Amino acid sequence: MIEKQLWFEEIIRKALEEDLGPGDCTTDAIIEPGARGKAVLEAREEAVLAGLHVFTKVFQALDPEMEFEYHYRDGQVVSSGGTICRVSGSFRAILTAERTALNFLQRMSGIATITREYVARAGKGKAKILDTRKTAPGLRLLDKYAVRMGGGHNHRMGLFDCILIKDNHIAAAGSIGEAVNLAKKNAPHTLKVEVEVEDLKGIEEAIRAGADMILLDNMRPEEIREAVRLARGRVILEASGGITLKNIGEIAGTGVDYISVGALTHSVRAVDLSLEVIKED
Amino acid sequence: MIEKQLWFEEIIRKALEEDLGPGDCTTDAIIEPGARGKAVLEAREEAVLAGLHVFTKVFQALDPEMEFEYHYRDGQVVSSGGTICRVSGSFRAILTAERTALNFLQRMSGIATITREYVARAGKGKAKILDTRKTAPGLRLLDKYAVRMGGGHNHRMGLFDCILIKDNHIAAAGSIGEAVNLAKKNAPHTLKVEVEVEDLKGIEEAIRAGADMILLDNMRPEEIREAVRLARGRVILEASGGITLKNIGEIAGTGVDYISVGALTHSVRAVDLSLEVIKED
Amino acid sequence: MIEKQLWFEEIIRKALEEDLGPGDCTTDAIIEPGARGKAVLEAREEAVLAGLHVFTKVFQALDPEMEFEYHYRDGQVVSSGGTICRVSGSFRAILTAERTALNFLQRMSGIATITREYVARAGKGKAKILDTRKTAPGLRLLDKYAVRMGGGHNHRMGLFDCILIKDNHIAAAGSIGEAVNLAKKNAPHTLKVEVEVEDLKGIEEAIRAGADMILLDNMRPEEIREAVRLARGRVILEASGGITLKNIGEIAGTGVDYISVGALTHSVRAVDLSLEVIKED
Amino acid sequence: MIEKQLWFEEIIRKALEEDLGPGDCTTDAIIEPGARGKAVLEAREEAVLAGLHVFTKVFQALDPEMEFEYHYRDGQVVSSGGTICRVSGSFRAILTAERTALNFLQRMSGIATITREYVARAGKGKAKILDTRKTAPGLRLLDKYAVRMGGGHNHRMGLFDCILIKDNHIAAAGSIGEAVNLAKKNAPHTLKVEVEVEDLKGIEEAIRAGADMILLDNMRPEEIREAVRLARGRVILEASGGITLKNIGEIAGTGVDYISVGALTHSVRAVDLSLEVIKED
Amino acid sequence: MIEKQLWFEEIIRKALEEDLGPGDCTTDAIIEPGARGKAVLEAREEAVLAGLHVFTKVFQALDPEMEFEYHYRDGQVVSSGGTICRVSGSFRAILTAERTALNFLQRMSGIATITREYVARAGKGKAKILDTRKTAPGLRLLDKYAVRMGGGHNHRMGLFDCILIKDNHIAAAGSIGEAVNLAKKNAPHTLKVEVEVEDLKGIEEAIRAGADMILLDNMRPEEIREAVRLARGRVILEASGGITLKNIGEIAGTGVDYISVGALTHSVRAVDLSLEVIKED
Amino acid sequence: MIEKQLWFEEIIRKALEEDLGPGDCTTDAIIEPGARGKAVLEAREEAVLAGLHVFTKVFQALDPEMEFEYHYRDGQVVSSGGTICRVSGSFRAILTAERTALNFLQRMSGIATITREYVARAGKGKAKILDTRKTAPGLRLLDKYAVRMGGGHNHRMGLFDCILIKDNHIAAAGSIGEAVNLAKKNAPHTLKVEVEVEDLKGIEEAIRAGADMILLDNMRPEEIREAVRLARGRVILEASGGITLKNIGEIAGTGVDYISVGALTHSVRAVDLSLEVIKED
């Protein structure tokens, strides 16, 4: 869906507005309006790329004629020192848009890169890596797109596209069974129902009530393995809470279907990319 | 400036819209519209708090009558296990706004917390810690506010409130001196001029051209110390590039005035905060 | 979700702006700014009410102090001649907001009223009445809320919260099985999969591929009955296409789970409501 | 004025946003990003077309290169089975935009079609058919454009471009004469004044006060005929209230100048149009 | 219509955003967040006031609790040295909003003040003073409101609420008569028709074609007097073009109905008002 | 920065919306949709041009294909009678956009023209002419751009890009010295500090506290001359308050660095420009 401009045009405009305000006082004072420039986008560390469309659109918001020659696509790995793309167009626009464009790309590629690492550590089994709703405010769709580029999968986009019954909902309803009943009665039948359980005895109750998915909250690997055994394939199982690069391999080995990792998006490390600008002769 | 609502009302609305879409299908199905709820916000690790105003406003966007009883203020340190505030109001609103409110607060407090650590490591000398423009798109003002709450200082807010002449500007102008001249001639005199230099010989040239500040780009501690000696207090000096928790102490010891750290905002680790929700009897 | 203001505040503002433009030239010329007024909202035909919250908010956009005394709630039936509510506040605001407020309420109540009729004709069996995405542009959430108030149920809110594989998707994928496979592979596992089939042989293929729901497109009652028999309860069945008040009873009798009716929202008849305005003494 | 994009760009964007949300999960999963498609827009019943520009713009919001080959223009009649246009472009964009584009076009053509029927039934006399302000919230300009395409005429666009003194204004002012005086004194002289009268004795009073137009509210044909006689051509007369396809012919025969029909826009039946999509080889 | 907030809330927000950007760096650094302040708004020259509601709303955008004690209302004359109102509330908000609030009020009062002077010079005859569409972009409604406060009247609000046939329209249509015919045929009958004529022979043609008003473009007083004679009260006459404080008296004496003056809004002199701020003890 | 569209696209859209509302009823009724037109923009008095980019964009908002052939650039002087540019495109768009386009251009050129006059009267000395924040709400950036085109310089863009300590700040802090200290301590070091002083003894205090600039508020020429003597080049001096075309020469002769003139933007006289429209054959 990243090809569609509706979603990220507005966040790009907001990002440029907060950086430019009334204008780039340095560039406007020093660079001639008509000057042309070229730049090269390079990786200073190995990274999985995500957000090249957004990177492009940031520059084109200032110079619609800006041209890009890409050597990589989103989802591909660039090595340290690799040249990602060449940019040419208004020199002012290159200098003015640079930081905003990189802020998007470095964050998104950071998410893709760490996702790939979790995916790799999870191994070749069936367990898939999921994101969560712990994204930077305003950047949900971009953050989740980056997870996909890193080989992860998306959990629900928001509160609206999947029912996820948590402890507070269960407490309010009185029991897992009653909570699922209410959800099935009052919410559209077009939505799946996931139930968060904190111990093994919740699993059978959730399955009987008709849950499509069960979220195993903060369970130890041996508990998860037992949950897999109890579920007997009748329901999709997701492990969540306390997942790290260290323990994901063990958890993936339990036979669980999905492992969700909040850190993919709530604690992002920007990857080191650099735009080397060259003035045209 | 965080007390003024103009700036963060819109980003709060956007954040809620991306999470709620057409509605919280789980909560709307299970919780009665009129139900009242209470919740307690707790720290699961030590943290410097930042963003409590924003946290409040997210809930009040859904329930304007939501009440908050704060035990801490922005900028204060809460210990692991500490109770930050008590919330009471519409139970639906508490459950629906929870994640969005925490996404803001955990990011902002993460920035404040790491900033405090850089400040502490810099020691009691005169060197102050600065942020950069490497912030999450759309969150610039919140990110920079959080840096202040952690004891750091803000570098320019954007491209508009301070002239910062970088290598590309210098290359285009022909020399440091010519770049500063163009800036002083063409930009408002109300703006300070900072010049980025990559070696020691740029310092004298920048000072003579009338720079107010010099950014020492990626210099080793001994170079910075020499720069301090050369400048003889005629100009404000800022060290930038490659700063880590490990080397900041040594750099602070060089006598430089400011040290800017991109990682404060480009690679944020969300602090672990938890909203424990309790249904009212 | 209708209690939350985020969604309908904007459409109310747009609706008022298009009606008021630079101002109500008649009311502003004739009515004193400080005059107080009262009005009574009456039904001129039997109707299921929907949209009273919106009705209220339209007036309060012009006079935040406007007061309402409701005798009915959304979802209730008012008889012809019944008094729905009493309004009091700024006389100018009452006259200026009247038409916009009624345009919302009459459309929404029109949807609720016809929905109730479809529900009644479907009888006491298990078949539930569904809406579609054939709503007035910009009014999707209000239209779908009105369907619920009439006793109907909502199909998906948009293209994002349920996978619905139609003939064109199947043709592109090559077969029902392949289309479902692609959906399950590429879309989030948190989404249900519905498949539209045009004849009975598609049913088994869809079930085997793992569809959660099957949409029986434009089938005759006897075909639907046969589909129910073939499905043997393994999948949710929805009849769609060509449903009218005349044939819905027969279709409901086939044992199908859901019947979707585009006419609920694409061809709305506004119910006849009237605001009788009385100037205060 | 439909050629100007300022007005309908925003409502198109809103309509797409409410339908697409975070994306078309079905099409994105099944159709390749680069796939090209073709489609044919066909009429399944005779209809007066209105909204082809809007139809075009909806698709082009997702694929600016989408191409259209139209066989009809707005205002023309297409027979059942007729091909209205051929569309070619991004296959994803065709599938994703289809429903939103049709929702606009089917509603607008529905308005044009019923308007033409009222116009036809009114006969060849001088009476012209008018719309009212009873339009769908947010769609006023599109609804009124559609009325013109069906051969009808527009009454005022909103509360701002013509003075229309109703019963409540008259009651507040004390008399028809006083209400007209206030309007002429306080409102811009550039606006015409219409007065709503409920019985024949109001007509002379309104004319003497200087009304440009008189709205005959809910009068029987014989009363309207008498009103025409009394007015002696000194004022424009408009019949309003309770107009149906059955009685419009008789009312048109009274000699009244205009007949306004709320049902043209408050109770729209979408015409049956279908977009048959074909994947390109 | 100035009491309704819909219209000026947005322009106030824009004005504050362009002045505050990321914040008032001076006030935020020097004034404590909780400090209370008082201020007195004084006139430094005689002025007709306009815009006190807007003045209030600017401050309340930053401090909703700000209190105002007004000694004057819009449309009243304040003498030089007179105290217009007392303000009390957040001291930060007073200092930060001051300039934006004054920018609105000084411009609007400037318009009202010069309008009053034109009205006075026109004398006690029937000629009324009109504004034009030559207003500051984005401030149309405020500018026109200010004209009314100065005793002037509003010409049309925009291109939409009155037909004004100018020379270019006449040239395109072929003749005045044909232009009026086209307007009456194609535009809603609810709109008045004004025709701009450049010489006396156009007057009879316009009247015969059915114009409601005639704009006498750039005519000398004797021509206008002759126009009045020729029109014999059959049509409203408006003199326009080249009107100054010097010649308006003579033009008003011709018997023309309206005199429109572009300078009321296209060349505004801000009146001198001053907000004297006092910190609370 | 005027080349970048982000800033003025929105104000152009707002300006067109307030003028066009639901449409140009005259032009739409009389001019054929497909008609082509040409027009010539002429000066009716000598003027410094500013805003030609904005002028262009207003027309192109209605007809993106509109073509312009410019004979002048912003900042150049056009004589009375001079042809500024030729426009060709949709005839409807030319007529509909004309007034809005001129409203921008006449105001901006008015600002540039008066600025040039102040600059000329200030003479060839070092004193530069500055604008203030007394701009029309919503038009700040355009007003300040126009000042530059007239040969003036910009003071700060808003409250955010330069510290300006005024009398109220000083009173709150207790002294000039304390106010400067607070500003230097609490505001970013990247901002310059200007202090407003009302008498000569404030000058030394401000310099000692570290002010970068001093605003001499409402001082007589002899005081300013004394201030220049006292400052001895240690600080930038700005004269402000009560500056007129009559006294600016004398003030410029005092040796002050900058002279700020509120009247440049708060009391603008639109220059007389005319768009002569010609229908294409």
Image (cartoon, coloured by chain):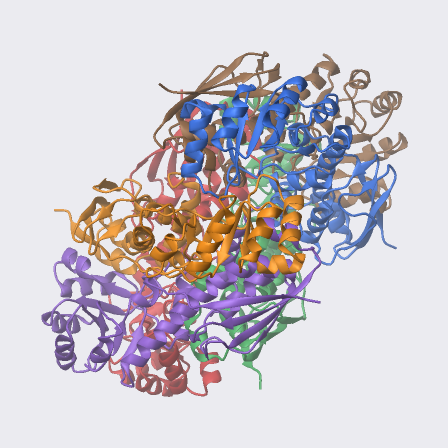
Chain colours: A red, B green, C purple, D orange, E blue, F brown
Q: Judge whether residue B113 can be spotted in this image.
A: no
In-front residue for pair C202/B177: C202
Residue F227 horizontal side relative to residue A262, left or right: right
Residue occupying the point 35% across, 72% down: C114
Quadrant in the picture for residue A198: bottom left
Q: How many marks can you see?
A: 0
Residue that lies at the very extreme toward the left in this rendered image: C201
- Image spot of residue E138 (x, y percent): 58, 39
Residue F185 horizontal side relative to residue B219, left or right: right
- Image spot of residue C190 (x, y percent): 32, 69
Q: Judge whether residue C257 can be spotted in this image.
A: yes
Residue occupying the point 25% across, 54% down: D95
Quadrant in the picture for residue D65: top left
Residue F5 horizontal side relative to residue B71, left or right: left
Q: Quadrant of the C terminus of chain B?
A: bottom right
In-front residue for pair D55/A77: D55
Residue occupying the point 43% across, 59% down: D222
Decide: is D95 above or below A97. Answer: below
Residue occupying the point 18% across, 62% down: C179
Decide: is F40 above or below A49. Answer: above
Residue E174 horizontal side relative to residue B77, left or right: left
- Image spot of residue B256 (x, y percent): 65, 40
In-front residue for pair D74/B272: D74
In-front residue for pair F205/A212: A212
- Image spot of residue A103 (x, y percent): 46, 46
